């Protein structure tokens, strides 16, 4: 199905050859690195003059309504006068305005006023999910787009798109650059064509299962090429592409062809097309050969997209696999009272889900919902417990589904139709019942991503599946069934004729790019607050551990929960009250106690001398630190780091960072991204302290490590804190205390 060539390979006449065969064909690694599509796009956007150390400017930006307020507030505090590039503000996360009274709609009003003042594009709620809109309106061959959402991926359109935390978008708004070392490029070689019933989510899950835990494509660009691409329609390609985020890659890019050309033309943007292919001899650090004809219908079991197995395997081994899910539930959620066993959902040898959802940037595409409608054919789902909802990803998609009759088929079957909304992907829509099992064509199935609150005794489960298999399972009363087993299933066409009607956008979207009006006032609701002031890095640091997490992986959802907390994303102080609330409910209290000592130290250093372990309170700052093994998988949301900073956080300690974007968030909020070898062996616990002498001097120089003292109840020991790959500007941001301070001092 998927074969990994870890030694790398070369593009050769539409295919590839393993690295060891390259020299015989006249291929060389150094020259080959410059022949990938990714290299060419990055080179055309790099302004550093040095391809080893990139400084890139993007063609467009996009944010949704749980990130754009903070981004604009940060940029405004740093001197923003107008948006220097197209900036699209969508309203697809807090669309329901159902939590917190007026505050969600207050954010939307703020966003519209900002688009008018600074010259942006404002997409009102229920018009489109962020990535559908950007595919329809902005993606184009050879372009680069940055978005404050981790699933910013438009590679199938020939666009390198990157999801990052808000501060990286602030840099673009202030005319600065996106700075990274030249990333590795991993070739994804596609051959064959999918079997009937196998959809894009199946292909994506198979790739994620192969790559995520092995770190095969971590912080790399995934470059898709090969004859198999021609068998995939545009929505199919985008459905695979958007899920590359779950591999922990940096970005993605695909070969383009007539299918892309026709799709862009149908959207009125024929000029955005150009053919794109690797050059002969293009070198890839690794190659994955994906045989599309061997990919099966897949299911990703809780609690990660990488927990994927063929549905056939699940049905053959459901008791063992469900037992593994229950063990993960106990361990990851640390439950005193586990929910009722999932084995009770097995009846007559079949496992029955309680709910189905097809939604968002991955599931709510025209092709996915059309195929679901073709399978359901208006047949009633019945009045038992199982129910199915569908969220078309944009108004144009909704209108086309209506024009072709697909909407009527879905509604006749009893499918609940919703507007364009991302809620099911992060726990703000279609929250299952306690103990329920939901099958979803959406992006993630992390713990509590469906909206449950274990602290309140609530637990439910999400498994990821393709829309085709969800529809077939719905016909079977929720029994997990592979679409490939459905006798009437047809193969997906390589091209889907699509009539694009953007009249809804013309009627409602504010198109203000390049039309800044400085006289336009920003409209602030009572929940929109400025970022609290941060102080520069002191000479020395005394850190107290406020939380110690030993899970193999810590997601951003665990660092700052999604769902109802999103309503407070415009208020840093209120939002920080939720930090680690589901993972470590004592964290906020501990962090506040540490912060209180630091605030007292600033007022009167001598008054806290007894609490400083004998270190000089005049030159030594006192802050909290979160210790974890591998933090930051998941969302790009900056608040996963900024909430720690608001509560007095000064650093993170970990073995390694799960993603580049979380590490960047830590840095941009003025915290030191320490890594520690064999961190688990140190037995660090809340209340332990770490003294870091000379940290300011180390950051002012080019030191890549510092010697620190770990202070535990059983004594002290020296440890090495690493801070490798910190370029000068990132060091200066940390020294200044945060990105806002850094720009204020420039």
Image (cartoon, rainbow, N blue to C red):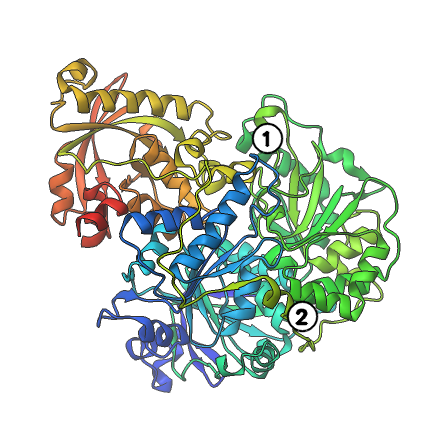
The residue depicted at 49 percent of the width and 45 percent of the height is 107
Query: Element at badge 1?
Result: loop
Given residues 676 and 648, the one toward you in this image is 648
Given residues 254 and 307, the one toward you in this image is 254
Given residues 573 and 161, the one toward you in this image is 573
Residue 405 pos. (x, y %): 81, 67
- Give the total number of marks visible in the rendering: 2
Provide the residue designation for mark 2. Answer: 194
The residue depicted at 50 percent of the width and 81 percent of the height is 273
| Left or right: 78 as drawn, with respect to 116 | left
Question: Can see residue 374?
Answer: yes
Residue 375 pos. (x, y %): 81, 62
Question: Can see residue 149?
Answer: no
The residue depicted at 13 percent of the width and 34 percent of the height is 539
Q: Nearer the viewer, mark 1 or mark 2?
A: 1
Provide the residue designation for mark 1. Answer: 453
Q: Is residue 16 above or below residue 644?
A: below
The residue depicted at 64 percent of the width and 26 percent of the height is 338
Residue 124 pos. (x, y %): 57, 55
Q: Is residue 119 above or below residue 551?
A: below
Alpha carbon distance from label 1 to label 2 = 38 Å
Q: Is residue 237 above or below residue 583?
A: below
Return the mark for residue 237: none
Q: Is residue 466 above or below residue 436?
A: below
Q: Kindly indicate the quadrant of the structure image that contains residue 206.
A: bottom right
């Amino acid at each position: 199905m998927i074969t990994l060539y870890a030694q790398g390979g070369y593009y050769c006449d539409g295919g590839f050859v393993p690295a060891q065969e390259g020299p015989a064909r006249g291929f060389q690694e150094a020259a080959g690195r410059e022949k990938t599509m990714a290299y060419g796009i990055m080179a055309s956007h790099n302004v550093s003059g040095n391809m080893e150390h990139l400084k890139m400017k993007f063609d467009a930006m996009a944010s949704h309504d749980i990130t754009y307020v903070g981004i604009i507030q940060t940029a405004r505090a740093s001197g923003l006068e107008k948006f220097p590039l197209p900036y699209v503000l969508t309203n697809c996360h807090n669309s329901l305005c159902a939590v917190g009274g007026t505050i969600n709609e207050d954010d939307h009003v703020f966003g519209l006023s900002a688009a008018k003042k600074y010259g942006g594009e404002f997409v009102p709620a229920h018009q489109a999910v962020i990535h559908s809109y950007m595919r329809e309106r902005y993606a184009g061959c050879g372009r680069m787009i940055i978005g404050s959402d981790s699933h910013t991926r438009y590679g199938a359109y020939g666009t390198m798109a990157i999801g990052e935390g808000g501060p990286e978008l602030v840099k673009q708004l202030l005319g600065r650059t996106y700075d990274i070392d030249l990333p590795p490029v991993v070739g994804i070689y596609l051959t064959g064509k999918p079997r009937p019933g196998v959809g894009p989510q199946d292909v994506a899950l198979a790739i994620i299962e192969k790559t995520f835990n092995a770190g095969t494509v971590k912080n790399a660009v995934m470059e898709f090429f090969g004859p198999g691409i021609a068998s995939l329609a545009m929505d199919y390609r985008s459905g695979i592409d958007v899920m590359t985020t779950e591999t922990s890659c940096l970005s993605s890019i695909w070969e383009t062809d007539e299918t892309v050309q026709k799709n862009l033309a149908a959207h009125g943007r024929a000029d955005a097309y150009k053919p794109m292919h690797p050059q002969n001899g293009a070198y890839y650090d690794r190659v994955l050969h994906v045989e599309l004809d061997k990919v099966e219908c897949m299911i990703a079991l809780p609690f990660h997209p990488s927990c994927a197995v063929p549905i056939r395997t699940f049905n053959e081994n459901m008791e063992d696999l469900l037992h593994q899910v229950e063990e993960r539930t106990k361990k990851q959620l640390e439950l005193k009272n586990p929910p009722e066993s999932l084995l009770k959902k097995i009846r007559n040898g079949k496992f029955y889900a309680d709910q189905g959802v097809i939604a968002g940037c991955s599931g709510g595409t025209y092709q996915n919902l059309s195929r679901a409608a073709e399978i359901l054919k208006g047949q009633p789902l019945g009045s038992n417990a199982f129910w199915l909802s569908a969220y078309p990803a944009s108004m144009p998609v909704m209108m086309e589904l209506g024009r072709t009759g697909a909407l009527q088929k879905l509604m006749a079957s009893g499918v609940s139709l919703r507007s364009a909304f991302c809620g099911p992907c992060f726990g703000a829509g279609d929250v299952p019942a306690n103990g329920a099992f939901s099958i979803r064509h959406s992006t993630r199935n992390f713990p509590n991503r469906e909206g449950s609150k274990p602290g309140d005794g609530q637990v439910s489960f999400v498994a990821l599946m393709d829309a085709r298999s969800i529809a077939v399972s719905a016909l079977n009363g929720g029994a997990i069934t592979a679409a490939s087993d459905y006798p009437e299933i047809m193969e997906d066409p390589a091209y889907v004729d699509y009539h694009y009607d953007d009249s809804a956008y013309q009627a409602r979207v504010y198109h203000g790019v390049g039309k800044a009006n400085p006289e336009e006032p920003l409209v602030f609701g009572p929940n929109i607050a400025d970022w609290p002031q941060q102080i520069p890095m002191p000479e020395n640091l005394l850190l107290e551990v406020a939380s110690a997490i030993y899970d193999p992986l810590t997601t951003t959802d665990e660092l700052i929960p999604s769902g109802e907390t999103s309503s407070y994303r415009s208020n840093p102080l209120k939002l920080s009250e939720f930090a680690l609330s589901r993972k470590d409910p004592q964290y906020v209290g501990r962090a506040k106690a540490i912060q209180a000592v630091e605030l007292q130290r600033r007022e009167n250093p001598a008054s806290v001398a007894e609490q400083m372990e004998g270190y000089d309170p005049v030159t030594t700052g006192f802050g909290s630190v979160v210790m974890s093994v591998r933090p930051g998988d998941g969302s790009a949301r900056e608040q996963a780091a900024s909430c720690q900073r608001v509560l007095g956080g000064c650093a993170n300690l970990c073995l390694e960072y799960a993603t580049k974007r979380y590490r960047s968030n830590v840095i941009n909020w003025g915290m030191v991204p320490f890594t520690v070898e064999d961190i688990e062996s140190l037995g660090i616990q809340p209340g332990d302290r770490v003294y870091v002498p000379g940290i300011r001097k180390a950051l002012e120089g080019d030191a890549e490590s510092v010697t620190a003292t770990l202070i535990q109840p059983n004594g002290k020991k020296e440890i090495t804190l690493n801070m490798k790959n910190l370029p000068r500007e990132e060091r200066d941001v940390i020294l200044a205390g945060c990105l806002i301070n850094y720009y204020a001092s420039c």
